[in-house]
């Protein structure tokens, strides 16, 4: 795949220009300049805070009913007042994932921090830095005053270390000092011998915890030089005159560790890495990474602008110059790269608000660098299955299982209910309580929302062992909660949730003088999620041949759930009643889960509801004061893709890339939203945008596949190989002049699937365990085993 590099000719001046690498546990954003290189190191388990029991009073079913009666009677203030008394715990040691340290490399070759052509005519240093997506390596190269230096760094998942090599061609060789600086909390470094820095730290902070609790870390950095001299003193290693030097870095924490044996782990990893040597480590790194990355290739058309540095290409999008289809493909593959780098099959934790990286800004906010369960964590894994990285989904599956165990006490304590529940966010310790403000914290389906990823993982993989051992037990317990928790609406006779909110939006009732409200009974988001949950549980139980009585119970509840409703403005209602939005510019569009990632709304099967969803999007998008942030732009792209409107979808993804990406192509949230004072890195936009590009080319629902459903006119010719559809099916396609030339549907499921393109339909399937259906649409259809 050509041009799969982010590259620049300017030094990285700040974190927003640094290039990320990671191995699913350690992250590093590399800031390269001719005179200096800084590694911003993170570790996914380096959390402040601690496990804590549920807080606040224990409630009974009668307490809930008193609350609900206020809402049913239209007394929203009274209901909210009781909810604050009963369902609003105190914030204690919730914690946050902190940055770990900075490794600082200072080079001495008379290189200026900002190279210019001075008055004496001195030549400007030639500088180049890049992130190679095909190799997961960051490189930089500099030439100045007759000296050439080449540097590269990667994070190897195979050997669990960070590795760098620096080479010099010139009379002076490499002259470099290396030090480590802690980012947060107590941090100590010690130079041992002349080649090693040992360090220890504690993840302590006092915004999200009491400043006295958190994970501890211990690690090592070691330098190996060829030629020249090594010396160490005052926390710094100095290299003088080396032809080549290598740096090996390892760190581990005591997260979930018993005893002190974890402290030896970094030394063992470093010893093993150094025995292998740089070249063997690099070979094993590529052998581990490249088979995952190479599963999908994408060509959306060539571009003369591919020869420009990445920051200049992003700037062209910002200026409305979108004649660079290859930049969309680069953004797509960057999202896949970030998935592989941030979430591996054996990762201890899944990706949080910032993946596994951290610019430090979210840690300063009230909302923290954590697991947001009302959009952000979900969006991190939106593309995972479709872009053929199913293994990267596994850490989230494990986390959901552990969250369900923690959520049992929350279900009993707050709702006197069986099963499990979690709310608006969680942490490394399995926090499952409501948030500490009902307006946003009482999102009673946050845990269920994240658990729908188990449904997706099964839908794509058809892994019945996963279904039987993990997904069904967890989701069965989620169903137990909602069956116990829901109540009959006295006006409609429907089963509804509540009090709950529609994340994180608000509305006016008929009595506008009472001001805007957040809590109500039966918000649309809840009902969509509960319907998907119960339908999944019924089908899963049938597949496994278990729980016949529960199947009947679930089906009875399904028959009592509210339908999706269309409001007086033609919009899809966000709440059970046709309330007026108090914030029509709001960034969240949670009720459109029914359109994506759910499929209760599709143009093919529910055209009236699809039209109502479009009205909702148009109303929101027409607002000049729209809360324009990364995940909203990605959602617009996803929703329009599901509405088969590629030209609208591509505009929003172009906006995401041009307006809401830093120079390093990581997405961000603008100031002014949720109290932010500066642009704050939030990675969900990268993954949401990647998912949107995939959805524009391939969509799949239960038993059906749609080829090129939202192909924009600006991608007239292209091809894609390796995208996945539900049913463990892989698709290869090519198109010219906006028309499909050929599609191959490969899968190993014995059932059949309907394939749609351009108003035509075919049946693809057979009895072969491994088959390939060749679909030369639109002229004719043939089947080949």
Image (cartoon, grey):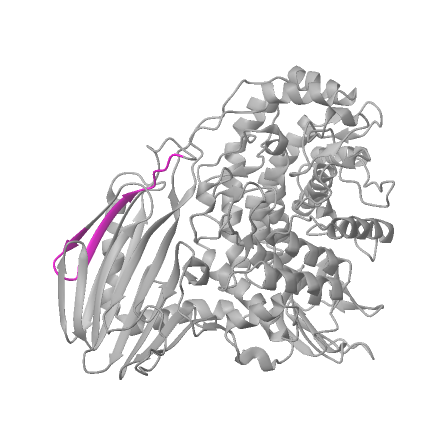
Residue at (71% x, 75% y) in the render: 743
Magenta includes 191?
A: yes
Q: Nearer the viewer, residue 387 or 784?
A: 387
Q: Nearer the viewer, residue 145 or 15?
A: 145
Q: Which residues are magenta?
A: 190-206
Residue at (75% x, 34% y) in the render: 552
Q: Is residue 65 above or below residue 98?
A: above
Q: Is residue 283 above or below residue 92?
A: below
Q: Is residue 238 above or below residue 575?
A: below
On the image, the x and y values in percent for residue 569 come to 86, 43
In the image, 5: left or right of 533? left
Q: Nearer the viewer, residue 665 or 782?
A: 665
Q: Quadrant of the N terminus?
A: bottom right
Residue at (87% x, 40% y) in the render: 568
On the image, the x and y values in percent for residue 346 come to 43, 54
In the image, 160: left or right of 307? left
Q: Quadrant of the C terminus?
A: bottom right
On the image, the x and y values in percent for residue 705 come to 74, 63
Q: Nearer the viewer, residue 572 or 470?
A: 572
Residue at (32% x, 55% y) in the render: 102
Occupied quadrant, residue 191: bottom left
Magenta includes 701?
A: no
């Amino acid at each position: 795949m050509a041009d799969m590099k982010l590259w620049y000719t300017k030094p990285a001046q700040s974190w927003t220009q640094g290039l990320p690498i990671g191995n699913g546990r350690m992250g590093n954003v590399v800031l390269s300049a001719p005179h200096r290189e800084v590694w911003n190191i993170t570790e996914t388990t380096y959390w402040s805070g601690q496990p804590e029991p549920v807080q606040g009073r224990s409630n009974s079913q009668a307490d809930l009913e008193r609350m609900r009666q206020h809402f049913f009677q239209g007394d929203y203030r009274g209901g909210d007042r009781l909810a604050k008394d009963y369902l609003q715990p105190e914030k204690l040691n919730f914690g946050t994932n902190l940055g770990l340290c900075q490794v600082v490399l200072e080079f001495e070759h008379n290189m200026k921090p900002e190279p210019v052509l001075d008055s004496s005519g001195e030549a400007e240093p030639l500088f180049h830095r890049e992130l190679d997506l095909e190799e997961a390596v960051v490189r930089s190269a500099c030439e100045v005053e007759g000296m050439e230096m080449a540097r590269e760094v990667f994070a190897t998942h195979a050997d669990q270390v960070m590795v760098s090599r620096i080479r010099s061609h010139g009379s002076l060789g490499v002259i470099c000092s290396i030090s480590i600086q802690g980012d947060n909390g107590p941090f100590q470094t010690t130079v041992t011998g002349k080649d090693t820095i040992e360090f220890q730290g504690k993840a302590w902070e006092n915004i999200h915890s009491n400043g006295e609790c958190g994970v501890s870390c211990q690690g090592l950095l070691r330098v190996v030089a060829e030629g020249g001299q090594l010396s160490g003193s005052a926390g710094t290693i100095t290299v003088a005159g080396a032809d080549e030097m290598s740096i090996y870095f390892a760190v581990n924490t005591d997260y979930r560790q018993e005893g002190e044996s974890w402290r030896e782990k970094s030394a063992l990893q470093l010893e093993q890495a150094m025995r292998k040597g740089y070249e063997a480590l690099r070979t094993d790194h590529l052998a581990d990474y490249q088979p995952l990355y190479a599963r999908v290739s994408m060509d959306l058309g060539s571009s003369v602008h591919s020869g420009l540095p990445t920051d200049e290409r992003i700037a062209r999008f910002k200026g409305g110059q979108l004649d660079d289809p290859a930049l969309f493909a680069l953004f797509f593959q960057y999202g896949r790269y970030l998935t592989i780098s941030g979430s591996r099959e054996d990762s201890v934790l899944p990706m949080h608000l910032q993946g596994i990286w951290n610019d430090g800004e979210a840690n300063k906010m009230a909302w923290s660098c954590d697991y947001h369960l009302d959009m952000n964590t979900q969006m991190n894994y939106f593309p995972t299955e479709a872009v053929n990285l199913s293994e990267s989904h596994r850490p989230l599956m494990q986390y959901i299982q552990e969250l369900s165990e923690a959520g049992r006490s929350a279900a009993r304590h707050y709702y006197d209910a069986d099963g499990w529940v979690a709310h608006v966010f969680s942490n490394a310790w399995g926090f499952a309580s409501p948030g500490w403000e009902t307006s946003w914290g009482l999102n009673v389906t946050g845990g269920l929302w994240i658990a729908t990823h188990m449904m997706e993982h099964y839908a794509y993989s058809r892994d019945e062992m996963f279904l039987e051992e993990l997904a069904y037990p967890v989701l069965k317990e989620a169903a137990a909660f909602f069956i116990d928790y829901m109540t009959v609406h006295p006006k409609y006779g429907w089963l509804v949730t509540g009090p709950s909110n529609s994340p994180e939006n608000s509305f006016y009732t008929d009595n506008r003088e009472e001001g805007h409200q957040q809590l109500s009974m039966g918000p649309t988001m809840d009902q969509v999620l509960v319907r998907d949950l119960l339908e999944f549980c019924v089908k899963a139980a049938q597949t496994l041949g278990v729980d016949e009585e529960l199947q009947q119970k679930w089906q009875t509840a399904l028959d009592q759930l509210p339908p999706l409703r269309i409001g007086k403005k033609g919009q899809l209602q966000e709440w059970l009643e046709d309330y007026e939005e108090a914030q029509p510019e709001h960034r969240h569009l949670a009720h459109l889960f029914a359109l994506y990632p759910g499929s209760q709304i599709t143009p093919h099967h529910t055209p009236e509801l699809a039209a109502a969803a479009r009205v909702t999007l148009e109303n929101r998008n027409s607002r000049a004061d729209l809360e324009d942030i990364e995940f909203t732009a990605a959602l617009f792209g996803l929703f329009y893709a599901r509405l088969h409107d590629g030209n609208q979808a591509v505009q929003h993804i172009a906006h995401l890339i041009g307006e809401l990406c830093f120079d390093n192509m990581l997405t961000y949230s603008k100031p002014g939203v949720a109290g932010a004072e500066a642009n704050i890195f939030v990675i969900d936009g990268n993954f949401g945008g990647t998912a949107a590009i995939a959805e524009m080319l391939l969509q799949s629902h239960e038993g059906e596949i749609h080829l090129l459903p939202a192909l924009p006119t600006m991608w007239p010719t292209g091809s894609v190989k390796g995208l996945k559809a539900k049913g463990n099916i892989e698709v290869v396609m090519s198109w010219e002049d906006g028309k499909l030339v050929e599609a191959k549907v490969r899968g190993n499921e014995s059932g059949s699937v309907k394939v749609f393109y351009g108003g035509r339909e075919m049946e693809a399937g057979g009895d072969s365990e491994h088959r390939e259906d060749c679909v030369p649409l639109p002229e004719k259809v043939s089947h080949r085993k």
